[in-house]
Amino acid sequence: MEFIRRSIINFKQYPHRLFYYGLRRNYCTKNGEAESEEWPRRVVTGLQPTGALHVGNYFGALRRCVRLQDTGDDLMIFIADLHSLTTHQNPQALQENSMELAALLLASGVDPERSVVFVQSAVARHAELCWLLACLATQARLAHLPQYKEKAATLKEVPLGLLLYPVLQAADVLVYGATHVAVGGDQAQHLQVAAQLVRTFRHRYGCQPFPTPRALLPDDGSDRIRSLRDPSKKMSKSDPDGKSRILLSDPDDVIALKIRKAVTDFTPQVTYEPDTRPGVSNLVTLHCLAAGLTAEEAVEEAAALTTAQYKQVVARALVAELAPLRERAADLRRRPRLLRDVLRAGAARARRRADAVYERVAAAVGLAPHAPPADRARAAR
Ligand code: ATP
Ligand code: MG
């Protein structure tokens, strides 16, 4: 019945497409639910190589990848160099930053045997699928997104790439048939764009070659590290105030200094009340993440301390976590060939996975076949 109903709708709206429908059904699935037998759980995440990383990026993204990997998730991590180009980048710095990010990922514990680690631009399918999805997206919807509006408001000439950014993000995920995306809270709306594109695809072509991806948000507060200078904002690479963030490259004494200068309030006791006391609660969160404590444990440990004394405890915990990471990353940076080999092998695995999905999409939209179908067994891992 469903097939007949859809055929009638299809025929009324797009008579020329009906001819291809039977062919497309072989390539597409109607069951778009995330994490089913048809769509085994797969997590994708991307990180932009746009400058020095801070502890927010570490706890909210890098270490989170390691946790997901260690719980056995099928994880794909890409260095989002194409996304970086939406704002002007110095070409040499962009390359350097990509290698730095690769070093930090491995230094954090990402294992390239278990997770697929690669550079986005090395897998052309991201951009190819982006084009197909861009033809389904509307300018009005994209221009309405808060992040676009915020960024566009600061520019005289708005690059088209900035508008398309969420479409490329959708392609990054859909091209691997990913069921989940490890994102920070700031990206949740962009994921809605991906879900909308999946729906539009299904309505337009009567099939669904990828599941609807869901956000995977952490429950330990690691996606909401706040600025040390203005705790109403998140810690951010692009904040003009360098003291608002602790960089992963900061030496121990700089970490201690930045924590000492962190804005709190006039109450000396340490409590965890993110809504009413965001500054001191942010320090508790950092302490918990660095030392592996719950908020209750951290507050109990700080019961006899003033906020000023507690800052020393937080700084020590951060130094204990970040100093070894800094050294491991520096070690890896001295081995560029190893980093390149890891990224090359990761890109080859990613390409095989992307080819399998892209071919289904290309067939569904009616692109003429120009390559033999990917070897499905080979593409499975
Ligand atoms: P920008 O200000 O340029 O947007 P950013 O600091 O937000 O930079 P991104 O490159 O946008 O960094 O994000 C990289 C990853 O780090 C993303 O997964 C994002 O969700 C996460 N992330 C960014 N800021 C924080 C933060 N303050 N707390 C936790 N996670 C964060
Ligand atoms: Mg950001």
Image (tube, grey):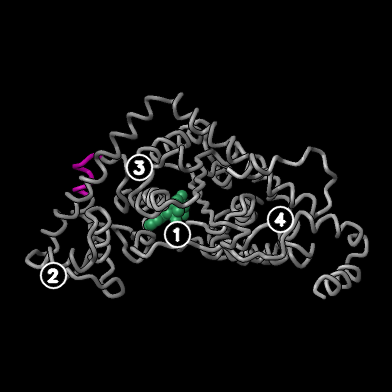
Magenta range is 251-257
Mark 3 or 2, closer to the camera: 3
At label 2, the amino acid type is Gln
In which quadrant of the rendered image does the N terminus lie? bottom right
Task: Name the image quarter holding residue 33.
Answer: bottom right
Q: Residue 32: x percent and y percent?
A: 65, 64
Q: Which mark is residue 239?
A: none
Tell me the distance, in whole angstroms, between the alpha carbons under discs 4 and 2. 52 Å
214 vs 118: above or below: below
In which quadrant of the rendered image does the C terminus lie? top right
The residue identified by callout 4 is 133
Q: Which mark is residue 184?
A: 1
The residue identified by callout 2 is 269
Tell me the distance, in whole angstroms, between the alpha carbons under discs 1 and 4. 23 Å
The residue identified by callout 3 is 108
Q: Residue 374: x percent and y percent?
A: 71, 40
Left or right for 154, reference 229: right
Tell me the distance, in whole angstroms, between the alpha carbons under discs 1 and 2. 30 Å
For the question of whether residue 162 can be seen, the reply is no
Is the residue marked by circle 3 packed among few (<14), some (14-19), or many (20+) residues within 10 Å? many
The one nearer the camera, 355 or 274, is 355
Tell me the distance, in whole angstroms, between the alpha carbons under discs 4 and 3. 34 Å
Question: Would you say the beta carbon of the disc 1 residue lies within 8 angstroms of ligand 1?
Answer: yes
The one nearer the camera, 39 or 303, is 39
At label 3, the amino acid type is Ser
At label 1, the amino acid type is Gly
Task: Look at the numbered disc 2 and give the secondary structure of its residue.
Answer: loop
Is the residue marked by circle 1 packed among few (<14), some (14-19), or many (20+) residues within 10 Å? some
